[in-house]
Amino acid sequence: MATLSLAKQATIPKLGVMNAVKKLVAVFALLMLSLTPVAPASAHTEIDHTTPAAGASVEAGVQNVSVVFTDKILNLADSTEIVISDAAGQAVEVSCVEVKNSSISADAFFPTAGDYEVTWRTVAEDGHPIDGTFSFSVTGTSEKTDFISCLDQASQGNVVIATPKAEPLMAAENTATDDTGIAWPFWVAGLLVIGVGVVVLARRKSSKG
Ligand SMILES: [Cu+2]
């Protein structure tokens, strides 16, 4: 028995273990290369700016609320939505919702001071659904006198009226999110390779001692 185990040890030279570790590192590097999305010639659509700006303070009354993207967004049926909620989570009435070229825009009436959150979703020109939220605050108070419905403009040109929903969307990210389907296999593969590496090193140590 003792001789067998000794013979076994002798057949695993240190160099072999080092080569195995090197191979694992190489495999990991290849995995990283194949799984890391290569930046395409045209980057994914991102937010250029919003109005009001995130964190900004605006006066009570009618305000235009918009999300302007770096690229065109797709004007598909029911693919775009913008919901403005007050601090209590109640949806604020919006009007004149437009999806045009690279922006989502709506008018909203803000009667009282407070914090408001804008939740939006749309589809980027490359077909990726994108969504996000941003917040701003309102100061002062205003009477609802100058808020005119723009619903009549629905049939004009490429203006689309998105029906605001009472419930804000579940998405709670501050920035535009893209498809992240590539992230989890990357981490699973990484952890697997690290795990195998640890086992190999542990075996090497135990074979030494
Ligand atoms: Cu994209």
Image (tube, rainbow, N blue to C red):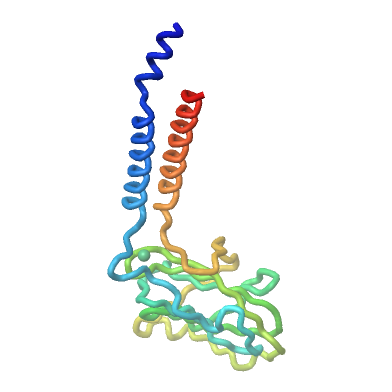
In terms of depth relative to the viewer, which is nearer, 23 or 129? 23
Position above or below: 123 against 152 = above
Relative to residue 178, is residue 120 drawn left or right? right
Name the spot of residue 146 as percent of width and height, x first. Answer: 60, 93
The mark total stands at: 0
Name the spot of residue 149 as percent of width and height, x first. Answer: 53, 86
- Toward the top, the furthest residue is 1
Position above or below: 176 against 137 = above
Determine the quadrant in which ligand 1 lies. Answer: bottom left
In terms of depth relative to the viewer, which is nearer, 180 or 207? 207
- Residue under the image location 44 percent in, 31 percent down: 200
- Residue under the image location 61 percent in, 85 percent down: 109
In terms of depth relative to the viewer, which is nearer, 106 or 47? 47
Name the spot of residue 147 as percent of width and height, x first. Answer: 58, 89
- Residue under the image location 36 percent in, 50 percent down: 32
Q: Quadrant of the N terminus?
A: top left
Relative to residue 191, is residue 7 drawn left or right? left
Name the spot of residue 148 as percent of width and height, x first. Answer: 55, 89
- Toward the left, the furthest residue is 41
- Residue under the image location 44 percent in, 66 percent down: 130
- Toward the bottom, the furthest residue is 146
Tell me which corner region of the image, top left, top right, bottom left or bottom right, holds residue 38.
Answer: bottom left
